[in-house]
Amino acid sequence: MTSTDPLSAAACSGRHVVILGTGGTIAGRAAQSTDVVGYKAGQVAVQDLIDGVPGLRQRLAAGWRIETEQVAQVDSKDMSHAIWRRLAERVQHHLDRAEVDGIIVTHGTDTLEETAYLLHRVLAPSRPVVLAAAMRPASAPQPDGPQNLDDALTVLGWPGARGVMAVLGGQVWSGAEVRKVHPYRLDAFSAGDAGPLGFVEAGQLRRLRDWPSTSPLGLKVLAADIWPEVQIVTSHAGADERLVELLVRAGVQGLVVAATGNGSIHQDLMAALLHAQAAGVLVMRALRGGAGCIVPAATDLLPDAGALTPAQARIEVLLRLLARRGG
Ligand code: SIN
């Protein structure tokens, strides 16, 4: 089903936006501007990032208000549970302000799918929360971050926009589905079989599907001081049971297995996972291939994560364990 929103950007004037910075390549800087590989992520303050946004002056003239807040400044490979909790709290804090129309989170691309999924499951906001990132550092001769931020503002300002989304390379993704599939290309993201929610084209949103929605768990689920330990193991040729046994002995509470085929698992690994499940570990199968959805069978011995990537499934398991504790 295709639904197009034939509205001009002018219809979205006067928005009040909060941009929360967490670091990433979008805030990256290299010693030489031509270096788009050997740079350091998370260097440029979020306040300075917005200065390069192409449509900024026009938006400010149209009555937009843009606040910034630096929540973290990390390479997202180093994202932590503590930063996630702080970020979720700050997003919720600003969503609780009636005058705020939406939030943008600047983020690294490497774990964007995890943060997006976490925010989606915990908050499911009735206003837009848009993650913006970049594949080239801010110091590059042609950085993609400023345009991605401008596109994020377009999505945020669109009438009716809601839910957690990510905007990169002119494509709009659901926070429930987005995943990074390429280490270098500007269009490095996908949503598996689900495809994008829409496209930003010359300041217009062409929406293909409805806005993301879910039943949120609520922020209190993240309140626990110590989060359960959830690890990912991979099923592969020659896989054996020892890693799972070690993890169970070490006290792991959740395990995601990155599975082959339609969620199949090497027989030796499977035996250990069933033991872990019997011992009370929450075990979940996710596809290791980056697309598709596990089609469940009546004979399945372990639950599946549907179309989630192993990294997203890890968050799903984490949140279920936290919810069991009562938040
Ligand atoms: C990061 O994830 O922080 C570094 C890589 C990137 O943003 O593209």
Image (tube, rainbow, N blue to C red):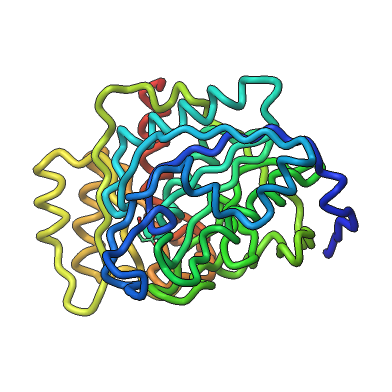
**In terms of image quadrants, where is residue 86?**
top left
Q: Is residue 162 left or right of residue 166?
A: right
Quadrant the N terminus occupies: bottom right
Seen from the viewer's position, the closer of residues 217 and 110 is 110
x then y, percent, for residue 277: 28, 46
The residue depicted at 36 percent of the width and 57 percent of the height is 28
Q: Decide: is 90 above or below 117.
A: above
The residue depicted at 50 percent of the width and 71 percent of the height is 142
Which quarter of the frame holds ligand 1?
bottom left
Q: Is residue 147 left or right of residue 107?
A: right
The residue depicted at 41 percent of the width and 75 percent of the height is 184
x then y, percent, for residue 301: 38, 56
The residue depicted at 28 percent of the width and 59 percent of the height is 40
Name the residue furthest bottom.
237
**In terms of image quadrants, where is residue 315?**
top left
Q: Tell me how many marks there are.
A: 0
**In terms of image quadrants, where is residue 216?**
top right
**Can residue 211 be seen by looking at this rendering?**
yes
Q: Decide: is 231 above or below 184.
A: above
Seen from the viewer's position, the closer of residues 230 and 276 is 230
**Can residue 126 be seen by looking at this rendering?**
no
x then y, percent, for residue 149: 58, 53
Q: Is residue 70 left or right of residue 122?
A: left
Quadrant the C terminus occupies: top left
x then y, percent, for residue 91: 52, 31
Name the residue furthest right.
6
Q: Is residue 37 left or right of residue 95?
A: left
